[in-house]
Amino acid sequence: MNPKELIAHVREAYGAEPEYLWPDYPDAFVFRHKTNRKWFGVVMEAERGKLGLEGTGSVVLLDVKTGPLLGGSYLGQPGIVRAWHMNKTHWLGVLLDGSAPAATVLELVDLSFSLTDQRQKGTKK
């Protein structure tokens, strides 16, 4: 799955649009809930070496919230790495270069959306 396919899926499934927050990084964006404004996905470039990957250059990465137990079960699967710029215990990185199966990417986006949705936990006041 690539970033354009991801944007189309998130738009259709959750009604969320990418938000480009960083002028110095025009290709980086977040997905967030309309209701509570919490992020459920962050897309950015990261250097391969900083992710523990072989080779040089950068990759496009999607960070998603998973939680410590479930997140650990995905590590080691193709295209799944520790998150970049997010809490590495509660977030995972998914490479958007086709190495992670599209079904896995969609599953993790759905999980992240659910984990960051306050309606699932009750409304906080």
Image (tube, rainbow, N blue to C red):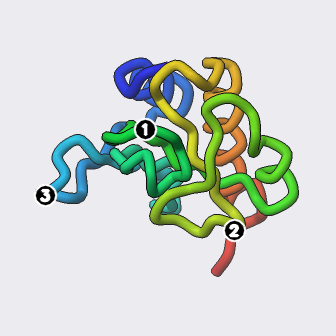
Q: What amino acid type should be assigned to the residue bearing mark 2? A: Thr
Residue 45: horizontal and vertical position, in percent?
34, 45
Q: Could you tell me how far apart the alpha carbons at marks 3 and 2 are, in whole angstroms?
A: 35 Å
Mark pair 1, 2: CA separation: 46 Å
Quadrant of image for the C terminus: bottom right
Circle 1 SS class: loop
3 or 2: tag closer to the N-terminus: 3
Q: Is residue 29 left or right of residue 34?
A: left
Residue for badge 1: 55
Q: Nearer the viewer, residue 46 or 111?
A: 46
Question: Looking at the image, which residue is at 72% across and 42% down?
Answer: 111
Residue bearing mark 2: 123
- Looking at numbered disc 3 in the image, what kind of residue is underneath it? Asp
Indicate the position of residue 35 as horizontal and vertical percent values.
50, 56
Rendered image: mark on residue 79:
none
Instruction: Give the side of residue 21 with respect to residue 12, left or right.
Output: left
Distance between the alpha carbons at the discs numbered 3 and 1: 25 Å
N-terminal of the two: label 1 or label 2? 1
Circle 3 residue: 24
